[in-house]
């Protein structure tokens, strides 16, 4: 029990665990929808990304309409959050 973590309820309008997030890459019109999960549940075939992945980490605690970026091996990626469910 020493390593137990209390998980609070999902904050409305803020990206957290089990949020379904719609994002759009800068310069693209195509939208992408991902669900933020723990590393054990991550599965790109189901569009479930880990909160510890570069994209997942960059999304955590952000709000609808925010622009954000993160580094990838191919360079900096910039996105906008379109919706959070």
Image: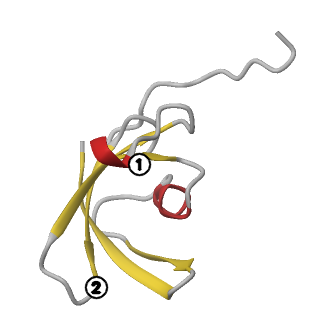
Q: Are marks 2 and 1 in contact (CB under 8 Å)?
A: no
How far across and how far down the image is residue 35, in percent?
Answer: 34, 43
How far across and how far down the image is residue 61, in percent?
Answer: 49, 52
At 14% from the left edge and 73% from the top edge, which residue is drawn? 30
Tell me the residue that label 1 is attached to.
Answer: 15
Q: Residues within 10 Å of mark 2 (few under 14, many from 20)?
A: some
How far across and how far down the image is residue 55, in percent?
Answer: 48, 63
- The answer to whether residue 47 is seen in the rendering is no
Q: Looking at the picture, tell me which residue is in the foreground, 66 or 55.
A: 55
The quarter of the image holding the C terminus is top left
Q: Residue furthest front?
A: 45
Residue 69 placement, left or right of 66: right
Residue 46 placement, left or right of 16: left
At 50% from the left edge and 53% from the top edge, which residue is drawn? 60
The quarter of the image holding the N terminus is top right
Tell me the residue that label 2 is attached to.
Answer: 26
At 28% from the left edge and 85% from the top edge, which residue is drawn? 26
């Amino acid at each position: 029990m020493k390593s137990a973590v209390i998980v609070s309820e999902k904050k409305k309008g803020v990206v957290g665990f089990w949020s379904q997030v719609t994002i759009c890459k800068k310069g693209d019109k195509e939208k992408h929808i991902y669900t933020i999960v723990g590393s054990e549940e991550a599965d790109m075939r189901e569009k479930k990304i880990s909160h510890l992945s570069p994209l997942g980490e960059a999304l955590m605690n952000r709000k609808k309409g925010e622009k954000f970026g993160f580094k990838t091996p191919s360079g900096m990626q910039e996105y906008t959050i379109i919706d959070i469910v």
